[in-house]
Every structure is written in C-alpha cells, then in structure tokens.
C-alpha cells in the first residue's frame, strides 16, 4: 500500500511540474508576445530565449539539490557516464531513424513537430538553435527523466513511462491521428535517454547525449533546408 501511495504521489508531482512548465511557457509567451513578434531580429530572438531561460531557472530551483550533486559527480566520472549514455543514444538513434523512415513512408510527411522546428530555424535562428541545442535538452530531461524517477522502483516501468510521456509531448502539435505513429520514434529516443539516466543515476548522462542529438538534428535540418 505504501509503494502504491508513493507511486501516485511522485507521479502527481511530476505531472504538476509538467503542467507548471506548460503554464509558464504560455503565460510568459503571452506576456512578451509583442516583443517576440517584433520585426527586430535581436529583440524577437533574445526575448524568446529569455522566456525559455526563465522557465528553465524555475525547474532548476525545484530540483537544484539533485542537479548540483549530479553535476559534481558528472565532472568527476565523465568518462564512464558518457560511455554508458553514448551507447544508449546510438541504439536509440538507430531505432528512431528506422521507425521514422517507415512512418514517413506511411504518412507521406515528416512529423508536424519537425516541420515547426524547421520553420523556427528559418524565422528565428538564434532562438531556435539556442533552445534546441542547449535549453530544451536540460528542460526536457528534468521533466521527463528526473521528475518521475522516484515514482518507480523497477527499471522497465520507468523506461516505458518516460518514453511514452516524452513521445506524447512531441505530438502536442499534431494535426491528424495518423501522426500519432510518431510517438514510436520519439518514444524510442526517450526510452534510451531514460535508460542512460537509470543506469548512471546521473541526469547529465541523458542531458549530454540529448544535446548531441539535437545538435546533429539541427545540422541535418539546415542541410535539408539548403538542399
């Protein structure tokens, strides 16, 4: 009974953190709406970055003790931690790429989330690159890996929950039911990010490979746009 009570308590906390994240993004984006939509390149990009940084700072305050401890350990044991996280990322990347190709063939399109990212890379490149490569990996790993971790005593339920939660979040902008298939590639990546965190017990294991992944994704997106 105590385990069940703890599970729902920790899951509830993680969902509240996610809702807090969404709420802050909506409130701040609306508050700075005119500046974000400014025709001035620097104002629009820098204000959009500021919104992301404010949200990240709030998340950091909530989990600061765990994050600080993990960062110190990461610096002292970076070789072993990165070895584990890179292996998991490569497997996750392969699964993601294969499933993406199959689903894109079925749907005839790329995921709407990917289309939106490409649009941002063109319209607000400074913001898009900063958010995708640096801010989003930290924010998302806190929300989808660190936040729900205490709710699970066993590995597989945690990995599956994190994968589905992460995959579903990337489908919030979907415009058709068939796009729900993209929960597979996004979820696969989330599964192996969660696996890295579970096996190293260090959130920077998944943050670091998430940053690497997004950097590669941004480069490929620009290559696709230029091609």
Image (cartoon, helix red, strand yellow):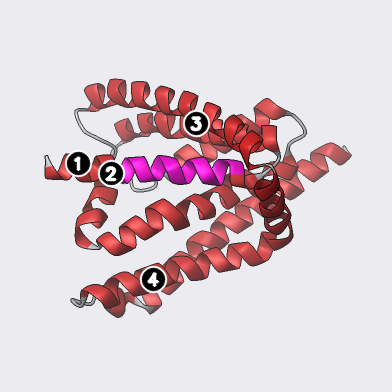
Q: Earlier in the sequence, mark 2 or mark 3?
A: 3
Q: Which mark is residue 223?
A: 1
Range drawn in magenta:
205-218
Q: Which residue is mark 4?
A: 29
- Taking depth in this image into account, of 113 and 4 the one nearest to the observer is 113
Q: Which mark is residue 89?
A: 3
| Residue in view at x 29 percent, y 79 percent | 35
Task: Find numbered disc 2 in the image and state the secondary structure of the residue it sits on.
Answer: helix
Chief secondary structure of the magenta span? Answer: helix
Quarter of the picture containing the C terminus is top left
Q: Earlier in the sequence, mark 1 or mark 4?
A: 4
- Mark 4 is surrounded, within 10 Å at the Cα level, by few (under 14), some (14 to 19) or many (20 or more) other residues, namely some
Give the CA separation, mark 4 to mark 2. 27 Å
Q: Is residue 124 depicted above or below 188 in this figure?
A: below
| Residue in view at x 37 percent, y 32 percent | 182
Q: Earlier in the sequence, mark 4 or mark 3?
A: 4
Residue 187 image position (x, y, % from top left): 47, 32
Give the CA separation, mark 2 to mark 1. 6 Å
| Residue in view at x 25 percent, y 27 percent | 104
Residue 125 image position (x, y, % from top left): 26, 60
In the figure, is residue 83 to the left or right of 54? right
Task: Find numbered disc 3 in the image and state the secondary structure of the residue it sits on.
Answer: helix
Q: Which residue is mark 2?
A: 219
């Amino acid at each position: 009974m105590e385990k069940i009570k703890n599970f729902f308590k920790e899951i509830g906390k993680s969902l509240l953190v996610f809702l807090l994240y969404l709420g802050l993004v909506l409130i701040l984006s609306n508050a700075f709406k005119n500046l974000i939509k400014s025709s001035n390149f620097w104002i629009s990009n820098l204000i959009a970055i500021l919104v992301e940084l404010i949200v990240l700072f709030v998340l950091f305050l909530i989990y600061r003790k765990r994050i600080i401890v993990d960062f110190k350990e990461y610096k002292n044991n970076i070789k072993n931690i990165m070895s584990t996280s890179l292996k998991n990322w490569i497997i996750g990347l392969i699964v993601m790429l294969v499933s993406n190709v199959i689903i894109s063939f079925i749907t005839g399109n790329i995921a709407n989330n990917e289309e939106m990212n490409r649009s941002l890379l063109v319209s607000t490149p400074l913001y898009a690159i900063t958010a995708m490569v640096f801010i989003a990996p930290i924010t998302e790993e806190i929300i989808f890996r660190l936040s729900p971790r205490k709710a699970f005593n066993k590995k597989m339920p945690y990995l599956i929950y994190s994968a589905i939660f992460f995959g579903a979040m990337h489908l919030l902008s979907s415009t058709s039911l068939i796009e729900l298939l993209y929960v597979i590639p996004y979820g696969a990546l989330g599964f192996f990010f969660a696996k890295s965190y579970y096996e190293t017990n260090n959130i920077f294991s998944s943050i670091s490979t998430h940053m690497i992944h997004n950097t590669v994704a941004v480069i490929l997106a620009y290559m696709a746009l230029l091609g």
